[in-house]
Image: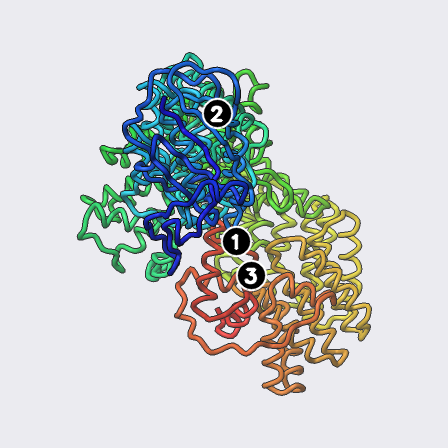
Amino acid sequence: MAHLRISARRPVSPGRAGFSTRGGGVRRGRPRARDAAKAQGQCRGVCATTEGADVRHSRHSRSTAGYARADSRALHPEIEPVGHSLAHPIGQVGGETSGPSYRLSETASPSVSTWKRRNNSSRLISGTSRRLRNNWPRAGTKVPRSPTWSTAVATHRMVLRTQRFRARGLASRGDASREYADGRLVSWSRIRYLGRMVGTAAADERVCSVMRHETGNLPAEVTSFIGRGTEIATARKLLSGTRLLTLTGPGGVGKTRLGRRVGEAVRRAFADGVWLVELAHVHDADLVALSIAQTLGLRDETSSPLVSLTDYLADKSLLLILDNCEHLIGACAALAVRVIHATTDVRILATSREPLGVSGEQVMPVASLAVPELDEDGQASRSAQVDSDALVLLVDRASAANPDFQVTEANRKALAAICRRLDGIPLALELAALRLRMFTPDQVLTRLDGAMRLLTTGLRTAPERQQTLEAAIRWSYDLCTPEEQHLWEQLSVFAGGFDLEAAEAVCVVDPPDVLLDALTGLVDKSVLGYRQDADGAGRYTMLEPLRQFALSRLVARGGERAVRLCHRDYYYRVAQRGRTAYWGGEDVTWFREVAREHPNLRAALQFSLADQESAHRALEIATELRPFWEHYRFLLEGYRWLLEALAKSLDRTKDRARALAAISVIAAMLSDPESATRFADEGLEIATELDAEDVLVEYALLSALLAFADDDPQRALDLAEAISGRARACAHHGAEMESLAFAYICALVLDDERAGVIADRFLAVTKEYGSHLLGGLGYWAVGTSHWRKGEQDKAIDDLRKAVELFSLFDRCAWTASGFDGLAWAAAAEGDLHRAARLMGAASTLRCGSTQRLAHEMTEFVGDKVRREVRDAMGEKQFRAAFEAGAALGFEEAVGYALGTEPCPDARPVKSIEADILTRRERDVARLIAAGYSNKNIASELVISIRTAQGHVEHILTKLGFTSRTQIAGWASRNQL
C-alpha cells in the first residue's frame, strides 16, 4: 500500500538544501541527501516520502501567515485519490479508516522554534505552525490517501522550506495540482475545512473551485474615482475597531463605489481576500446566505446554507462587502449576527439606505460630494473647478461622454450651479454629464427644476435602479411604509431643514401617533439626515433631489397647497413670537430660532406672495421679522420682502400700516430718507384713520429717526424722549426701549446733560423685562455715560457687560459699538495701544454692515477719539495696533474686550491685491474679518459648512497665510 512516512532527519543548511538567499532572493538548487541514522536524535525536521520519492527541508526555513509556495512535483503523480471519505477530520487521531490510506510513521511533530525566525512575520508564522503541530497525527495513524492530505504534507514541508515572507500559493497533487501549483493563495484553515469532504471527485472539484477565488472578487474600476479621501480613511479606521461597518446614505450618493474602494484599500489586511456580494437582485431573504456562499465558491449542496457558510468562515480572515442590504434588512442583520458570532477574523462592510440595527454595528453616513460656490459676478470659479469634488466629477464624466467638452469661462458658472442644484449627489451628476452631450451647461441648468424629468437617461450597463435619478429615489420610496411615504411627501415643503416641533405642526399622518415612528424610519432609510446644532437643537435635513421627488408626488396627489398653508401658518407663529420676545427675556431664543429657520421663513414668504389668498400673511410675516432684519443685518432682504408684500396686499388695514412703518425704519437705516418719508406718510395716514395708538407710536419714533438723518439731532432727541412715555402708556415696550436708546444716542452726540438720566432709565426698563439685546444697549448707554463723566472703572464694567450680552447673538450689529465704548474708556485711561486695538476689532465687525444710520450715530464720537489716539501714538504705531485688533477673530476679540485674553502683536503680512480672490472668497474673507465661524459663514451665504471650510482653505492657500487671524487683518487693510 502506498503510504506517507514522516521521518526524522537532520536538517541541512540552506545552501545544501538547495536554497540561496544571496541578494534577498530564493534560488532552487539540487538538495543533497543525508544519512537518516546520523540525523536520529538531533534537531528534528520532517520529510514526506512516497515510494522512493525523498523530499527534504531546511530547519532555517520560515513560514508565512498560513501560506507557502509549493511545487506539485513534490508528490508522485501516480498516487491518485480514491473515492473514500475521511473518517476522522484533520486533527483527530487514532481509530480505523477504510480504503486506501497513507501510513504516518516515525512522526516528528514540528517544533515551534523551527518556525519562528528573525523577521516581522514571526507572529503570523506561529499561527500556521501551531495548526500544523496540533493537527499532526501520531506515528502509525492511517489517513485516507487524498489530495487534501497530500496538500497538508506538502504544505508542512514547504512552509519550512519557504525562505521569503511573501509566499503565494500551495501545491497539491492529482486533479487539484494545476490549481495549487500556479501560485494562487490558499490558507491552512481552508485545508481544515476541505479535509472534511475530500475523497470524491466532486470534492476534489470543489477544492479547485474554492481555490480559484481565493484573493477576492472585487471588480476592476472602469471609471475614475473622484474624491472621498476622508471617507476612505475614516472607514479604514472604523473597520480596524469593529466587525460590522454599515455605510448609509440616500440612493445615488455613492455607497457602493465607496464600499468597493474601501475594500480595495484594506485588501492586504485580509489573508483570505475581500469579497463583494451584490444583493440588489436578490429579493428572497432565504437566498442571502446562499448568495454569499455562491460568491465564495461554495456550491448549493446542503439544506442549511447558513450553517455551511458559518462553518466555512469559522477561521477565515476576510472582508465581506454586502452591497444594497436595504430591501433585505432583516435577513442581512440576522446573517451578520450569525457570522460575527461564529468567526473571529471575518469583518462585514454593508451598504444600505438604513442601518442593519444589530449590536456592535458601526454606522458611517455617506454624504454627497462637496459642491462649488458661485460668485455673484459669475466670473471667478476657477478655484472651485480644482477643489470641488462635485465639479471635478461632473467635468470628468462630461469629458468621457463628449471628448470635445471643455470648461471655459463662459460655462464655469453654469457647471458650478448644476453641482449645487443637484446637491453634489454623484449619480445625479453623472446623469447630468450625459445630458451635456447634446445640451449646453446653461440649458441643463435651466431645466433642473424638473430634475426628475431631465435626468432620465443613464448608462445601459448600470443597474436599473441607477439608470435614472428618479429610479434611484423610487427604490428608496418603495422600501418605505405607507406612513413613511406620506410623511416624506409632506416634509418636502420644508426648506433648509426642520425640527420635530415643525414636523408635528405641519404634517398629518393617520393615525397621528405613528408620526414619530415614520420620522425615525425615514432617518434610518437615509431619506432624512439628522444632526444636533451647537445649541443642542435637533435638526432634520433632506437632499434637494429627494425633496423634488417627494414634492412632485405631493403635487400629483393634489395635497401641496394644504400642506404649504400649514407650513406658512406655523412659521407665521414663529415670526409673531418676536413681537414680545424681541424686548423680553426670550430674545436670545427667538433670534436663534429665526436665524435657524431663515430658509423656511423665506419659503413661507415666497408661497404667500404666490398664493392669491395669502398675500396678507406675507405682509404679516415680513413685518414681524423687522427686528431680525435690523439687528441681524438683513436690512436689504427685509426691505425687498416688505416691498413685494405691500405691492400684493393693498387693503388699508392695521397690518399694512405696521408694514409701512417697518419698511420706513429699514429705509432710514439704509440712509434712504426719501423712501422712508414716502412710506411713512402713507402709513401714518392709515394709522390715523384707524386710531391705532401703538402704530402711531412707531411713526412718532420714525419721525425722530428722520430728523436725525436730516441733521437735526436736537429735534430728534426731544421727539424720542417724548415718545418713550407714549409707548409705555400703550404697553408698546419695544418702542419704549428703542425710543430711549435713540434718545440717549442723540444726547451723546449733542453732549447733552440729559444723557445720564436717559441711560439710567433705559437700563432700568430693560432689566424690568429681562431683555438681553436691548439690555446690552442699556449697559452700553450707561457705560458710555460714565465715560463722559470720567468714571472709567465704572464705564469699563458696564461696557464689558454690554459686550457679554451682545455676544449671545451670532450677528449682533451692536457688538462693534461695545468695542468702541471700551476703546474710548481705554484712551481716557491712557492705554492708547489697547484703544487702537479695540478700534481695529470694531472696524472688522462692521465690515459688510448695511446699518449706515446706526454707525453714523456712533462714528460722530468715535472719529473724534480715533483722531486723538492716532495723533498721540503716531501713524505707524497706531496702524500696527489697529491692524492687530482688526486681525482678531470674533471669539478672540470678545475675549480681549472682556480682558480674558491678550491681544497678539501684529503679524507681518505681505501685501496682496484683493482681486487675487474670487468674489465669493472675498465675501468669506470679509465675514472672517467680522468674526464669523464656518457655521455662521455657511448660514450667511446659504452654503454648506463643508463648502465654507473649503473657501477658507482656498483663501489661506492663495494668500500664503496660516490662520484666520491673518485673513481678518488682510481683509481690514484692503477694506473688503
Closer-to-camera residue (533/106)? 106
Q: Where residue 901 appears, x then y in whole percent?
A: 71, 67
Q: Give the residue displayed 71% in from the left and 52% down from the top.
A: 772
- Position of the N terminus, as image quadrant, is top left
Residue 385 in sight: yes
Residue identified by numbered label 2: 90
* Dot 1 amino acid type: Arg
Badges 1 and 3: C-beta atoms under 8 Å apart? no
Closer-to-camera residue (326/885)? 326
Q: Where residue 314 appears, x then y in whole percent?
A: 50, 27
* Dot 2 amino acid type: Ile
* Dot 3 amino acid type: Gln
Could you give the CA–CA distance between mark 1 and mark 3, rounded to whole angstroms? 75 Å
Q: Where residue 786 appears, x then y in whole percent?
A: 79, 69
Residue 604 in sight: no
Residue identified by numbered label 3: 851
Disc nearest the viewer among 1 and 3 = 1
Could you give the CA–CA distance between mark 1 and mark 2, rounded to whole angstroms? 30 Å
Q: Residues within 10 Å of mark 2 (few under 14, many from 20)?
A: many
- Mark 1 and mark 3 lie on one chain; the one further toward the N terminus is 1
Could you give the CA–CA distance between mark 2 and mark 3, rounded to whole angstroms? 85 Å
Q: Where residue 706 appears, x then y in whole percent?
A: 58, 61
Secondary-structure class at tag 2? loop
Residue identified by numbered label 1: 118
Q: Give the residue displayed 58% in from the left and 75% down from the top.
A: 883
Q: Give the residue displayed 44% in from the left and 14% down from the top.
A: 304
